[in-house]
Image (spheres, rainbow, N blue to C red):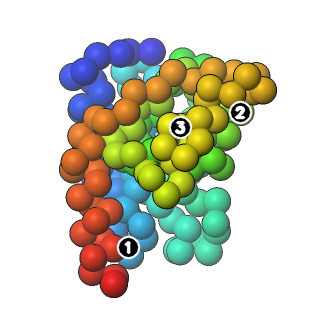
Amino acid sequence: MVESIETDVAMMRVAIEQARCAAERREVPVGAVLEIDGHIVARAGNRTIGDCDPTAHAEILALREAAKAVGNYRLQNATLYVTIEPCAMCAGAMIQARIGRLVYGADDPKGGAVRSCFSIFDSPHTNHRVASTAGVLAQEAAALLKDFFAVRR
C-alpha cells in the first residue's frame, strides 16, 4: 500500500470526479477509487438509481471491479478512496474483501459506519481490521452532496 498525503489527495480527486459523474446521472454524488501499489485498479460512482440496485454504491462497484481486474476477491494490499464515510453495507464489504486501508472525505452523520454512527472496523467481532484515514478533501466532498440535495429539495 502506498501511503502519503500527496497520494491520498490525488486519489481523492479522482474519487471526487467519479462523484461528479454520478451527479450528472442524477445519482447521489459518491465516488470511489481503489488503488493497489500506486495504480488505480477500479473506479466508480453511485449507480443505485440507474441500475435499480440498492447495493450499487460506489464502494461496492469499485470492489467488484477491482476483484475482477486482479482475479481475486481478496484485495489485501488495496486502499479504497471514497468521498464520504461508508455505510454499514460498504464497510462490511471492505472487511470481506480484506482491503488494507480506507481513505474518505466527509463524515456521514446520518449513516457513517466507520466512526460517525458505527465503528464497524473497530468491532472485536470482525475477522479483519481496516485502517482508515478521514477528512481528505472533506469540504469539497461534502459540498458535492450539499449542492446535490439543495437542488432536489
Question: Percent from the top left, x then y, of residue 29?
Answer: 37, 62
Q: Is residue 25 left or right of residue 55?
A: left
Residue 43 sits in which quadrant?
top left
- Numbered mark located on residue 2 in the image: none
Q: Mark 2 points at which residue?
A: 96
Question: How would you rate the neighbour count of disc 2 (Cα within 10 Å): few for under 14, some for 14-19, many for 20 or more?
Answer: some
Q: In this view, does 98 lie above or below 148?
A: above
Quarter holding the N terminus is top left
Residue 63 sits in which quadrant?
top right
Q: Name the residue under label 1.
A: 25
Residue 71 sits in which quadrant?
top right
Question: How would you rate the neighbour count of disc 1 (Cα within 10 Å): few for under 14, some for 14-19, many for 20 or more?
Answer: some
Q: Which residue is drawn at 33% across and 41% down?
A: 105
Numbered label tally: 3
Q: Can residue 147 be seen in this view?
A: yes
Q: Tags 2 and 3 in contact by the CB under 8 Å rule?
A: no
Q: Which residue is drawn at 30% across and 71% down?
A: 148
Q: Tags 3 and 1 in contact by the CB under 8 Å rule?
A: no
Q: Name the residue under label 3.
A: 114
First-in-chain label (1 vs 2): 1
Q: Is residue 2 left or right of residue 68?
A: left
Query: Under tag 2, what secondary structure?
Result: helix
Query: Under tag 3, what secondary structure?
Result: loop
Q: Is residue 121 above or below residue 137?
A: above
Q: Residue at x 43, y 51 (%)?
A: 108
Question: Percent from the top left, x then y, of residue 15?
Answer: 34, 45
Which residue is at the front of the view, 144 or 53? 144
Question: Percent from the top left, x then y, of residue 122?
Answer: 62, 26
